[in-house]
Amino acid sequence: MLLILDTADINAIKHISEYYPVDGVTTNPSIIAKENTDFWSLLKEIRKIIGEDKMLHAQTTQTVSDKIVEEAILMKKELKGSFFVKIPISEEGLKATMELKKLGVGVTMTAIFTPAQALIAAKAGADFVAPYVNRLDNILGDGTEVVAQIVKLFKLHSLNSKVLAASFQNAEQVHKCAMYGCDAVTISADIPKTLISHPMTDNAIAGFNRDWKNAYGDKTILDF
Ligand code: E4P
C-alpha cells in the first residue's frame, strides 16, 4: 500500500519523508491556500524534497475540460517526474481525463463519495480515484465501507484504477482502508506519528533502557 502525505507544509514534508516510508505528496487548492505563498515555488520545493521518483499529485483549479487539460500539461511539464493531476469528478472532469489519458498524463479523480462515481472515473481511465473517508464519516456515512466497495468493484470488473483513499481523521480509518485492500492512502502530517505510537511500546523501550543502565551505566554497545 502506498503511503502519501496530504500536505504542502514544507517542514512537515521534510521531516516525515526523512523518518517514514513515504511514497509521495498530494495537495489540493485548500491545502495550497493554507501556505499562502507562490504556487510554483511551493510545488517545485516539494518536488525537490521528494525527488522525481516519488508521486506528486496537484489539483487543477479549472472547471472546463480544455482548460483542465491545458493546466494539467503545464503542471506535468513544470513539476516533472512522477506526476498526477487531480481532477474533481464532473462531466468536464471526465472529458478531460479521457483526453489526458491519450496524452499520457497521469490522472487522480478526486472528491469521490460513492462507488458509482469511482466506477465511472475508472472507466474514463483515471489512474487513481480518491474517496474522502472522513468527510463521509462526518455526515454519518461510512467512509471506509465506501472504500471497501470501490476496492471490490475494481476487482470484480478488472479495472486498472487504484484506490487512493483520502480525508483521514485518525489511525483507525487508515487501518480499516489497509485491511480492505486499498492501494494507497494520503494522510495529513499529524497521522504518521499516531500510526506508530503505542503506550506499551513506550513502556517496553523504557524497560530496556532502565535494565541496561542499571547494569552498564552510560556505556553503549559502541563502547565495549
Ligand atoms: C484528497 O484528495 C483531499 O484533498 C483531502 O484528503 C481531503 O481531506 P480533508 O477532508 O481532510 O480536507
Image (spheres, rainbow, N blue to C red):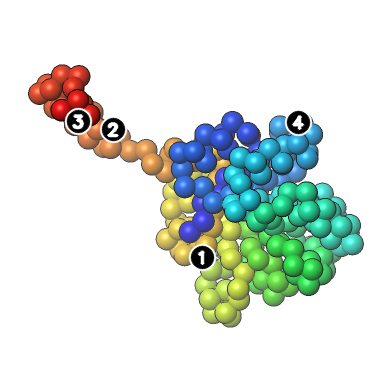
Q: Is 215 located above or below residue 108 in the figure? A: above
Whether residues under marks 2 and 1 lie with C-beta atoms below 8 angstroms apart, the answer is no
**Residue furthest to the top:** 217
Q: Mark 4: which secondary structure?
A: loop
Q: Is 114 located above or below residue 63 in the figure? A: below
Residue at 57% x, 74% y is 154
Q: Residue 168, position in %: x, y?
A: 55, 47
**Of marks 2 and 3, the one in the foreground:** 3
The C terminus: image quadrant: top left
Q: Residue 83, position in %: x, y?
A: 69, 55
Residue bearing mark 4: 36
Q: Earlier in the sequence, mark 4 or mark 2?
A: 4
> How far is disc 3 from disc 4 in space, using C-alphas?
48 Å
Residue at 75% x, 36% y is 41
Q: For the residue carrying disc 2, how many other residues have a C-alpha within 10 Å: few (<14), some (14-19), or many (20+)? A: few
Residue bearing mark 3: 221
Q: Earlier in the sequence, mark 3 or mark 4?
A: 4
Whether residues under marks 1 and 4 lie with C-beta atoms below 8 angstroms apart, the answer is no
The response on whether ligand 1 sits within 8 Å of label 1 is no
Q: Earlier in the sequence, mark 1 or mark 4?
A: 4
Residue 92 visible to the viewer = yes
Q: Mark number for residue 169?
A: none
**Of marks 2 and 1, the one in the foreground:** 2
Q: Earlier in the sequence, mark 1 or mark 3?
A: 1
Residue bearing mark 2: 202
Q: Residue 195, position in %: x, y?
A: 42, 43
Q: Earlier in the sequence, mark 2 or mark 1?
A: 1
Q: For the residue carrying disc 3, how many other residues have a C-alpha within 10 Å: few (<14), some (14-19), or many (20+)? A: few
Q: Is 10 located above or below residue 107 in the figure? A: above
Residue bearing mark 1: 148
